[in-house]
Every structure is written in C-alpha cells, then in structure tokens.
Image: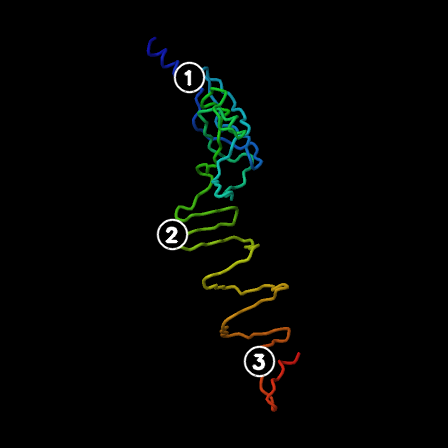
Amino acid sequence: MDVTALRQLIATELAEVHTTMPGVIVSYDGRSAVVRPALPKQLANGDVLPAPQIVQVPVCWLSGDVGGVHALISVPLKPGDPVKLSFSERALEGWLSGSDDAPDDPRQFDLSDAFATPVLRPGAHAADPENVSVQFGECSLKLTPSGDAILGGPGTFRVQMPAVFEKLLTYKAGLAGDGGNAGTVLRGDINHTGGVITSSSVVEDGHHHTDSINGRTSGPES
C-alpha cells in the first residue's frame, strides 16, 4: 500500500474518532442533558453534515459523597449555553444505568458517548482574575487572597438557620429586626455613644431599692 492510500485510510478512520469539541445545550432537567456539537462536520466532498443531538448526556459538576452526605456545586443551564463535550473510549449505556460491567457494544470514542462540562466561551464574559468568585446575575461572592469574603448584590441576604458570629459583628447602615416570639436577648455590657435611645414601650432595667423598712421596692411602673 502506498503512503497516500495509507494516509487516506488513517484519515477515514480518525474521522469517526471523537475526543473533545464544543457543544450546545438543547435541554437540561437537572439530571442529564440533550446536547449537540456546536460545529457541523464537513465531508470529503465538501458537503456539510449538520450536527446530531445527543441524548442522556451526563453533566460534569463538582460532586462528592462522604459518609452518605451528598455535596454538589452546580449552576442553571438553559438551551444555547456552551459546554465542552468529551467522548468516552467505551460505550456508556450500562454505566448510565448504574452498571460497572464491561460494555456489550465495542464502539470507542463514539459521538453518542459524551460527557458535558459547562464552559465559558471566549469573549462572552470576563472571569475575575484575582479572586475566587461565584457570580450569578448581579449577585457575587468574592474570596480574596487577603482573607476577606465579600458578598455583593442588589437583593437580600437571607439566613434560614440559626447563625453564630464568633467574631466582632460590625454594621454601617443601621440594624433592624424583629425578635418574634422569642424576643431579643443581649448579655454583657452595652456602650452607647451619641444619639438618643428611644422606646415606644416601657423600658425595665430590673433595678430595685431598699425601702424604709428594709424591703425591696418594685420595678418601674407601667
């Protein structure tokens, strides 16, 4: 076989070997995605073959399981979002069904055996080059090299579980809240400087005096 024919044979075989390419989300249900390669295939005769849709594609998130406790970091995906497609060297049907047995189908690097990883398309957005950053719309969390954690955005920061601040709590725009049925309890010294402390209800300090017959006076009157 001459070199030209050998090269053509190799090129023909390699045309069916898929490794990595950009893709596009068609749909996503939180478990698997339907995707299509972003780049169509040009045939040897010049014709362009439209990229097919690939179904039941696992999406690669940061995930773990420690002692039965599941951890997952994910972001929303919508149709049109870019992903990186990586193609398995073994058929995935069995693995997708929960089996780790050897695949029955001998295919390798096939277009149908893809994993999808969300990716930032060049020029679409700019990443933070200095901090660890989590961004969604106008909300962002920045972790800086100096040890600061900066949460910013136009919305409301909600904590739906008991919170403990083990260091100094400082606020700059006032403090407002509702103690609910439990009320509000403060322990320790309170130092007040400037301004006026006002209340729409009776303020009781628990302070008592000894009366003329060595009894204890009552608290402040309502």
Q: Secondary structure at mark 2?
A: loop
- Asked whether, in this view, residue 218 is left or right of residue 91, the answer is right
Identify the residue under disc 2.
Answer: 145
Name the residue: 38% across, 16% down.
10
Read off the residue under disc 3. Answer: 207
Q: Amino acid at mark 1?
A: Glu
Q: Quadrant of the C terminus?
A: bottom right
Which residue appears at 40% of the width and 52% of the height? 144
In the rendered view, tell whether residue 85 sits above or below residue 204.
Answer: above
Mark whose residue sits in front, 3 or 2? 3
- Quarter that holds the N terminus: top left
Q: Earlier in the sequence, mark 1 or mark 3?
A: 1
Nearer-N-terminus badge (3/2):
2
* Image-quadrant location for residue 201: bottom right
- Determine crowd level at label 2: few under 14, some 14-19, many 20+ residues with C-alpha closer than 10 A: few
Residue 90 percent coordinates (x, y): 46, 24
Q: Residue furthest bottom?
A: 212
Residue on which the image places disc 1: 13
Question: Is 65 in front, or is 133?
Answer: 65
